[in-house]
Amino acid sequence: MSDIILDVHNLSIDYRTSRGALKALRKVNLQVPKGKIVGIVGESGCGKSTLISAIINLLAPNATVSEGGVKFQDDDLLALTNNQMQHIRGNRFSMIFQDPMTSLNPVISIGTQMVDIQYRDKVSKSAKLDKAAMMLDRVGIPDSQSRLALYPHEFSGGMLQRIAIAMALLVEPDLLIADEPTTALDATLEVQIIHRLKELQASQGCSILFISHHLGVIAELCDEVVVMYAGEVVEQGSVRDIFHRPSHPYTQKLLECDPARIVDKTRDLPTIFGNLPDLVAVPQGCIFADRCEFASSHCHRLRPSRTVVEEGHTANCHLLSKEGVVHA
Amino acid sequence: MTATTTKLVATMPDFSFLRVISKSLIRLCHEPLGLLGLVLVTLIVSSAVFASWLVPYDPVAMDIMHRLAPPSFEHWLGTDQLGRDVFSRVLMGGQVALKVALSAIALALGFGLLLGLIAGYGPRWLDNIIVTLFDTVRSFPTIIFALAVVTLTGPSLTTIILVVVITSIPIYGRVVRTQTQALRAQEFILAERAMGASVPRILFIHMLPNVIGQLLILASMDVPIVITIEAGLSFLGLGIQPPTPSWGTILNDGYSFIRNTPWLIIAGGLPLILSTLGFTFLGESLRDIFDPKLRKDI
Amino acid sequence: MWFFLLKRCCLAVLIVLLAVTALYLMIHAIPGDPASIILGPRATEEMKAALAVKMGLDQPVYIQLLTFFGDVIQGNLGFDVFSQRPVTEIIMEQLPYTLILILTSISWAAAIGIPLGCYSAIYQNSLFDKVSAVLSVGTIAIPSFVVAIYGLLIFSVSLQWLPAIGAGNDGDFWDQAEHLILPSLAVGLGWVGYISRLVRSSMLETLSANHVRTARAFGLPERVIIFRYSLRIAILPTITLLGVGIGYLLSGALFAEIVFARPGIGKLIFDAVSTRNYPIVMGSVLVTTVLFVIATTLADFINAVFDPRIRTHA
């Protein structure tokens, strides 16, 4: 088995809509190496959620994969049958979802839900309960043994997200996919959860694919970062590369707009002018050209290809091919 | 202010009536069940409207010599125990059923609208009282309520209409109340209130257009229910009184002679089934087209 | 949870009180005093006065009402005008027949309707779903008394497979069961449609919920997802519907009892209405209203048992 645990290659996904095919993802490439944490960052509507649905093979009924594939360890996920896929889900990889308040079953106790997901293990129910309690302890839920009998609505949002993390790690996955797991939480909790997740990842040795629009969280947690914009990957590299040498104009703008990075007192928060392009009629040139202050006519006509900025750091921008790093 | 105005314009429904009607007709025709409903309803309504011209015989004229005659060329659906032509009675019965349905629903809709607006827009205590009254009315099974009223007032057309009106007011009232409560918190209403608009102006210029569509759909789905109540009461002998024909009384006649004359039962029941089916299919298709979220609390 | 139940019960009692008061006042609002109607045209003034005193009609209406409620609390619903037997006794004789009919009807309707709705939701937009949707609307639209009469015509009169009238001989289980088939077909048929449509729509809603996606993402078997994770939630509105629907069930039962000449509360009310037997009418309406209120409260209670959210929050 190679070092790459998850390999998304050239993945394109369309949604059938009344206006025509909406090209939600276009030729997306990304890899998650073994034992690493890879972050995907981008604003809402950039295709993060579609990408995740494709990876766990739970795409909406009106979505079709028009190109490319997803390789997980040695399996081509998109070619698997439902049964084969069910065998992988919650076993070799597991998920943490965005909204902890609605992602657990409201009428089944936490303990029962945590026992249910261990249905593959041939051990007694009490052993499964013990394992669940132990896992709750590890994510920092005190008095875990007695809380197993409680129902989701009896916990706070932060507690529920810890429970969701406990559930995801309970099955000892090789890959953990976390879809904006901290968005619904307040800032202090967010930091706690991130640290807990990092500790647990280190002790279990799994890989994590972490989706967020929050740059601070990505910087804190991840080893590598993939920047997505309007259904395309525009830049990827190590956290250091992306945060210290952002090479795509979009990444640069994104970093400028991060409130945490604003040093000077200002009345107006920086924004990126313009809107996301229409994904039913995708512009033929660079996807960011309309909003890019450096865009030339060349950028509007021709789609940029992946350009290596340095070892392990690539960006899709015409400006790079000649002048190297763009300076704002 | 401009923002408020655009919002206001956006929430006002499009009142070019003919266009709405032609558009919905076209969409109805694309759905097999909606089309079936439309055809059945058109057939029933037109036969009821033109019943007086269509009937081959006087529906109350007796002909004792030809009593309980099986269907024949002269009497398409045979005759009843008094020798009256069943086909003519079925046609006129349809007219009676639709008259009851239309007048009762119109009244119930009016009262329901009024009470719902008051409950939704008025003070809290009034709302509580009205809702409790609605719940009380709902706690009587319709037929049993009807029976109680009939004991008191005696059977008549007015009694049926009264019963239907009282039992259906809560259905409309609840929808109007919920809608009104949802609307009163919305920006354009708040803006109107801030500008000092009078309560009747708010209720009738702004609330009414927003609830009337839902009410009409509810009303169209209520037609089969009312027809059923009328037929049911008349079947029990507590509704339309002889000699006025009603599908219910025809069924009752048939029930009395069930061992000899099955055509009476078939003649009374089939138009009832066809019209309830027709109105239900039509009403549901209209709901699916205009307001898929509206679900009726049975 | 207990506070919630208490609140529900208070509201229930209030509704019963309101309903009975309304009915009582209506009886007294109509022209002609009950005593003359009961005794008929040939009664003397003395006879009328004596009966009026016996029935308490000489008292002001509010005293009569209070006396009536006082009697009701003691289980005394007055006396049958004709036989002079206690109304409570008569109702208690008839009630079991109606309850058995209602329970049988709703049980078979639920036994078919729930799987039908479930299957339609899982295979949404399939041919099965579409056919079952049309059938559901169809069964809802056909009035129950028409089903009763047509059932009588087809199965009893024409085919002679099933008995036409009565409730069967006491103590003979198979005879009674045989007499239940047609009435419960008439009462239950529409409910198959109601239940399957409701289960379908709430099942669709549940299956698209976030927590079901979580269950799928953990690779839980589809069987577990449907039965343990979804149906448990999707069934809740159906239970509420059954509680509220008891009124419709009673209406259906009334027609079935009349068409099949079956003893029961519906037939009792109908006969009492035809003879203007007020105590029986009052008593039966009171009992049916109480039944309605019990059924809705029971439905809320069952909902609370199934749904931990109600248990702690309400």
Image: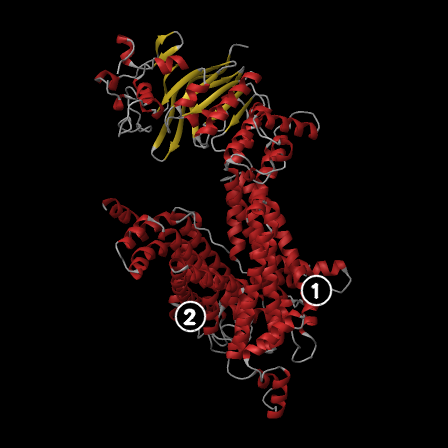
* Chain letter for the residue marked with disc 1 in the picture: C
- The foreground one among A131 and B141 is A131
Q: In which quadrant of the rendered image does the N terminus of chain A lie?
A: top right
Return the residue at label 2: B55
Residue A181 appears in the figure: no
| C307 vs C157: above or below | above
Residue A73 appears in the figure: yes
Return the residue at label 1: C167
Nearer the observer: mark 2 or 1; the answer is 1
Q: Are marks 2 and 1 in contact (CB under 8 Å)?
A: no
Q: Residue at x 51, y 32 (%)?
A: A158
Where in the figure is residue B117, as x and y percent of width and height? Answer: 38, 60
Q: Are marks 2 and 1 on the same chain?
A: no
| B287 vs C258: above or below | above
* Chain letter for the residue marked with disc 2 in the picture: B
Q: Residues within 10 Å of mark 2 (few under 14, many from 20)?
A: some
